[in-house]
Image (cartoon, grey):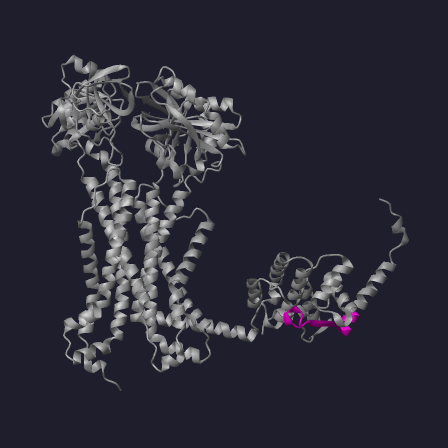
Amino acid sequence: MGFSLYHLSIMKGSYLGEFEELVLLTVGSLYKEAYGVAIMDEIESQTERSVNVSAVHAALKRLEAKGFVNSHMGGATNERGGRRKRYFELTLSGKKVLDESMALRTQLYSRIPNISYSFSY
Amino acid sequence: MQQQPPRWADRFLRWYCNPELLEEIQGDIYELYDREVAQHNVRRANLRFIWNVFRFFRWSNIKKSNSEYQSNQLGMFKNYLVIGIRNIRKQWSTSLINILGLSIAIGLALTTFIFIDQQLNMDSFHTKRNSIYQIINTVQEGDSDLARWGDSPIVLGPQAKLDHSVIKDFTRIEFRYGNLRRGDYVFNEFMAFVDPSYLKMFDFPIKYGYRSALEEKKNIVIGEETAIKYFGEEDPMGQPMSIKFANGVIQQYVVGAVMDKRPDNASFGYEIMLPMDNFFDLRFNDNYDWAYFTDATFIELQEGADPKALEELLASYKELQNQSDSRWTITDFELISLDGLGTEAFDIQESVASAGHPAGRIALGGLSVILLLLACFNYMNIAVASATKRLKEIALRKVMGSDRRQIIYQFMLENFIQVILAMLIGVLLSYYFLLPGFSYLVPINVPFVFSSWGAMVGFFASLLFVIGVLSGGYPALYISRFQPVSIFRGKEKFGSKSIFSRVLLGFQFFFAFSTIVGSFIFVDNAKFMAERDWGYDPQGVLSIPVANNQEYQKLRKAAAEKPEVLSITGAQTHIARNSTYTTVSNLDADFKAYVYRVGPEYGDLMGLKLKSGRFFEKDKASDMVNGTYVNERFVKELGWDDPIGKTFTYDSSRYNVLGVVEDFHYYTFWVDIEPVFFLMVPEDDYNYLVVKSDPEKLVAVDNYLLSVWPSISPNDPYDKAYQEDAMNGFHEENRANIVIISFIAGLAIVLACLGLFGLLSFNISRRLKEFSVRKVLGAQSVEIIRVAGKEYVWVLTTAFLLGAPAGFFMITQLINMIYPDPKQAGALPFIIAVLIVLVTVVITISGQIIRATRVNPSENLRAE
C-alpha cells in the first residue's frame, strides 16, 4: 500500500499552526456551540480579522485529523435550509496541546528581560 | 429561506462536494446567505454565496474516490483500452477507413495551419517590428478610385525625421539594376540602395561583418547566395567589387558584410545592398525633390509614440509633394506597422513586401475544415452502424453494473485512441508528404515549424478535443442509451433507418459535390487563363540588353547574318521586361498609362494585332516626333469613336494617334490591362535588341549570339530573355493552384466514398437475411440492387442538388478574388462532377451490391 493523503497528514504530527490554534481556542471557548459559522463569527469578533468560512472548515478538518477535536452532527432545524450542523468539541489531547502551547508562551514570556523595554528607537 | 441562492452555484457545489461533507458545508453557506439577505441585500448575498461556493472548492472538499475504488477505476480504464484496441483489430477494415480518413484530413489541416500560421506571422523575427512603420501613400489615379502605393517621396524620410522628434530613425529603399562584377564574373543583378540604419532597424541575420557596415560609403553588403555566386569558397570580406549602372557610371565597392540566409517568413530582404549616398552620386536625375519617389520609406518611432498622431502631422507634407508633381498627387500618408505589413501587402501597389493573398488562406482553411468534418462524419456514421455488432457487449456491461456514463467513457476512449493514431499518421503525412509538396508548389518556402509553442500546443490540443468530441460524442451518446432488456429481447432497432446517419451521409456528399464542382470550375478557369491569347506573339522572340548604340549596331549586324533571324529591332522599354507608368492628359482629363519606347519594326516583330491605322514607319520623321499607337483600353479610356488622328498630351508634347492595337498582356494575366501607348525613339536610346526568329531555331540563334557577345561587349553580361518565359511565374502559380484544388477535391470524394462504403457494407451485412428471403420469394438481382441502393440514391441526389450550386457560388467568389477577368462557368463542370462522383460511387459500392445479389439463401437463413 502506498501513502495516502490521510497517512501523510497523520505523519505531520501534532504541530499546531497559528490559525489552527486560534480555531482550537475558539472551539474550546464556544464549548457546546462550536460549529463552522459560529466559530467564524467568534474569531471575527474577537480578533477583528476577516475569515472565510471555508478556511475554518479546512482548519477544523485538519484539527480533527490530528485528534484535537471531536465532532458530531446536531439535530435538524428549520434554519439553514434544513441542513444539520456539525458541532466540534475539544478532545483531551486538544486541551493538552493548548495547555502546552500556553505554557511555552508564558515560559518564554517570563524570560524576556526588563532591559529590553528600555530600548528606544 | 424565502430567498433562494443562485441555483447554478448551488448545483456546482453539490457536483464537486464530497457527499459526506456536503450537508455541513451547504448548511453553513445557507446560514451565511440568509444572514446577508437579512442584513444587506439579495445581490450582495448572491455574490457572497457564489464566492463561498468557490472558496470551498478545494482539494479536501472535492469528491474523491477511496483507494480501493480508484484501483478499480484504473482496472476499468485498462479494460476499455484493451477492448478498444481489440475492436480496432477485429474490425480492421472499418477502423482503417476511419483512421485513414481522419489522418488525411488531419495531415491536410496541419499543413494548412502551418501555412496560415506562417503567413500571419510574417516578419516576426524583427524585434522592433511594433515600432517600425512603412509610410504608404494614398494616391488618386486619374478619375479612378484611391489606391495605396508603397512608394514615397525620397526626401520624406530625412525631412520627417528632422521635423518630428518621435521619429527615431528611418531608412529608404531604392531599387536599381546594375552589372555587378568581381574579376571575370559579371552578372546583371537586382540591388537595393538603403540608408545605413537599415541593418540596425531590421534584424536580418548577419554572417560576417557588423551591422554598421552600411555606414561606410564604399561598402557593399551581399547575401550568402551572392557571396557563393561570386566568391565560391573564398572569404568575400574586404574584397573589391564594381557595379556598372544603366547610365554607364561605374562605382567601386568593397564587401563590408555578408548576410545570412533570410528567415522563411521574411516578406522582404535583399541580396545586394548599397549605402544610399551612392545612389545620389549616380545622378540619374538632376535633383531629388518631392517629385522623386523611392520604393519604400520605413521609420522607427520612439517607444510609446502614437502612429495616428504622426500620420496627421505628416499630412503637412502633402502640399510640398503636390506642388512639385501635379501629375501624381498624394491625398494621404498612412503608417503601416511592420507587424501588419505582411497581411496588408496584397492591397498595396508596388509594395516591397511580398506575402500571400488572403484568398488563398481563406480557401485552404475552409477546405481543410470541411475535410475534417467529412472525416468526422465518417467516423460517426460507421461507429453508429457498427454498434450493431456490439449490442450484446453493451447490454452485458450494463447488466454487470456499468452506468451510462461509463459506457460513454468507454466509447469516447475508443474514439480517442483512433484519433490519436490518426493524429500521429497525420503528422507524418504532413511532415513527409503534404507540406513538402505544398512548399514545392507555392513560390515561398514553408518549413515544418510553428510560430510559437503556444500555437503548436493549442492547435494539437484543440484538434484532439474537437475531433474527439465531435466524432465520438454522438455515437457514444447513442450507443449508451440502449436498454439491456430490449437488447436481450432483440427489440432494439438501429442504424440504417436513422435519419441522422442519412443526414450525415448527405452532408458528406454535399461537400464532395460542392468541392468537386468548385474545383472543376476553378481548374476550367485556370486552364482558360493559361491558354488565353497573350494579345501578341511571344514565340521566337528574344531580347538582349545592350549598353549603347555601338553595341546595338554590332549585335544587330551579327544577328542579321543569320538566316533564321526573321526580323530585328530595338527598344528602350520592352514588353514584359520593363515599362514606364506615367500620366497622360487629354483636354481636362488625366489618366495613368504605360508607355513603351520602341523601334519602328517593334509592332510587327512582336505580333501586336493592329485594329486600325498603322505602326511606325521607319523613315517618317513625323512619326518619331509626335506619332504614337495605343491599345484598345487607351481608346476606351478616352471614349473615342474614331481614334485615328486624335491627339493627347504627354510630357508637354502632343501626340497623334496613328494606330490602335488589340489589348495585350504586357505583364501577366494576374494584372488588369491598363491604357498603353507606344512612342518611337532613336537608336541611340535603345536598351534592348529584340530579335524574332523561327521558333524552332530560337535556341540556335541564342547560342550564336552568346558566342559573338564577348567580342561585342566584353564588360557586360549576356542577359537574354525568351519572350515565352514572361508568363512562367503565372503558369507555375496557376499549375500550383490546379494541383492543390484538384488534390483537395479528390480527397473530398475519397472521404465521402469511404463513408458510403462503410455504411453500405454494414447495412448489407445486416440485411443479408432480408435479401435472402426476397430471393427465395423470387426477387431478381435488379430488384435487390434497387432495394439496397434506394435510400442512397435519394441522399446522393439531394446532396448534388444542394452541393453543386453551393460549390459554384463559393468558387465563383474565390475566382473573382484572384483572377482579374475570369471566364464564365459553363455546364461542363457540373456534368463532369456528376460523372466523376457517379463513377467513384459505383466503383465503391459495386462490390457490396454484388455481395447482396449473390447471397446464398440456404446459408443465411439456416438457423441452428
On the image, the x and y values in percent for residue B89 come to 34, 70
Where residue B705 sits, quadrant-wise, is: top left
Q: Examine the rendered structure and indicate whether residue B56 appears above or below residue B149.
A: below
On the image, the x and y values in percent for residue B220 come to 40, 26
On the image, the x and y values in percent for residue B379 come to 34, 64
Residue at the far front in the pictured view? B2
Q: Residue at x 36, y 17 (%)?
A: B283
Residue in front for this viewpoint, B157 or B380: B380
The residues colored magenta run A78-96
Q: Examine the rendered structure and indicate whether residue B500 appears above or below residue B130.
A: below
Work out whether residue B218 can be spotted: no
On the image, the x and y values in percent for residue A121 come to 84, 44
Residue in front for this viewpoint, A85 or B579: A85
Work out whether residue B750 can be spotted: yes
Q: Residue at x 18, y 69 (%)?
A: B786
Q: Is residue A76 toward the left or the right of residue A22 in the image?
A: left
Q: Examine the rendered structure and indicate whether residue B756 appears above or below residue B79.
A: above
Q: Examine the rendered structure and indicate whether residue B632 appears above or below residue B121.
A: above
